[in-house]
Image (tube, rainbow, N blue to C red):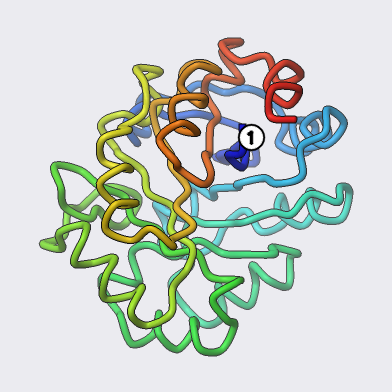
Amino acid sequence: MKIELIPAIDIIDGQCVRLTKGDYDQKTVYGQPLEMAREFERIGYRRLHVVDLDGAKSKHIVNDAVLRSITTATSLTVDFGGGIKTDEDIEKAFDAGAAMVTIGSIAVTQPQLFMGWLEKYGADRIILGADVRNGKISINGWKEDSTEDLLPFLKKYIDAGVRNVLCTEISKDGTLQGPAIALYKEVMAAYPDLHLIASGGVSSIDDIKALDQAGIPAVVFGKAIYEGRIDLHELIIDNG
């Protein structure tokens, strides 16, 4: 497999959790983020996706101390999202050791601010978050749906220099029902040079192999790890 493997850690109250379809009332706690991050690194993973779910809900970064603990205690390349709404927030994320940040809501609600960050920090450090529900971009911790359609939304920012996009199909997220491969193939057909990171619904190594065969460059997965559906050792051996 060529696909880039990115395990995920979602944080609420300093703990590693997973939600189902972004519903904060459907929460399962899986332990301490730093312990999980160290385990991923020990097995051989190099990337990590960290989401501050408290931040996404509060509209400002909350768990930057947890981010800092991971980036100081491991050598993982961490991308961080959730609650980045202001210059202070994005500076806080980078100061806490994030190599990249994922920006979603601001790209919808304050496009000029997003463009300023893209110009200031560069396309290698900014990941455009495109969380999709019923074909529309969702914002503010998936609490609201915007009027933005996915492909035109992506085109606007790809034309402006965005190269990295994290796309989550919300109806699949945390369900372990398989990823939205048709959606990702549609995106890649429209923008073949995009570094697309698929997210949501991964339930098995076979799902990851299917994404790889579909030509998707990268995948984020979390719940399948914590529920024991994916053997991380086997997956990294398959990934070669």
Residue 34 in percent (x, y) is at 78, 38
Horizontally, residue 134 falls left or right of residue 41, namely left
Q: Is mark 1 on a helix, strand or loop?
A: strand
Q: Which residue lies furthest to the left in this view?
A: 147
Q: Which is nearer the eye, 18 or 127? A: 127
Horizontally, residue 83 falls left or right of residue 111, namely right
Q: Which is nearer the eye, 162 or 1? A: 1
Residue 97 in percent (x, y) is at 75, 64
Which residue lies under the disc numbered 1? 15
Q: Which is nearer the eye, 238 or 142? A: 238
Residue 115 in percent (x, y) is at 40, 85
Residue at position x 53%, y 39% from top?
A: 220
Q: Which residue lies furthest to the top in this view?
A: 228
Q: Inspect the image, locate mark 1, and give the three-letter code of the amino acid beneath it.
A: Gln
Q: In which quarter of the image is the N terminus?
A: top right
Crowd tier of the residue under label 1, counting other residues whose Cα lies within 10 Å: few below 14, some 14–19, many 20 or above: some
Whether 83 is drawn above or below 228: the answer is below
Number of numbered discs:
1
Whether 68 is drawn above or below 40: the answer is below
Residue at position x 43%, y 42% from top?
A: 198
Residue at position x 55%, y 73% from top?
A: 89
Residue 110 in percent (x, y) is at 30, 79
Horizontally, residue 146 falls left or right of residue 42, namely left
Q: Toward which corner of the image does residue 9 lie, by quadrant?
A: top right
Q: Which is nearer the eye, 193 or 172? A: 193
Q: Toward which corner of the image does residue 79 lie, by quadrant?
A: bottom right
Residue at position x 36%, y 31% from top?
A: 173
Q: Quadrant of the C terminus?
A: top right
Whether 92 is drawn above or below 142: the answer is below
Horizontally, residue 39 falls left or right of residue 235, namely right
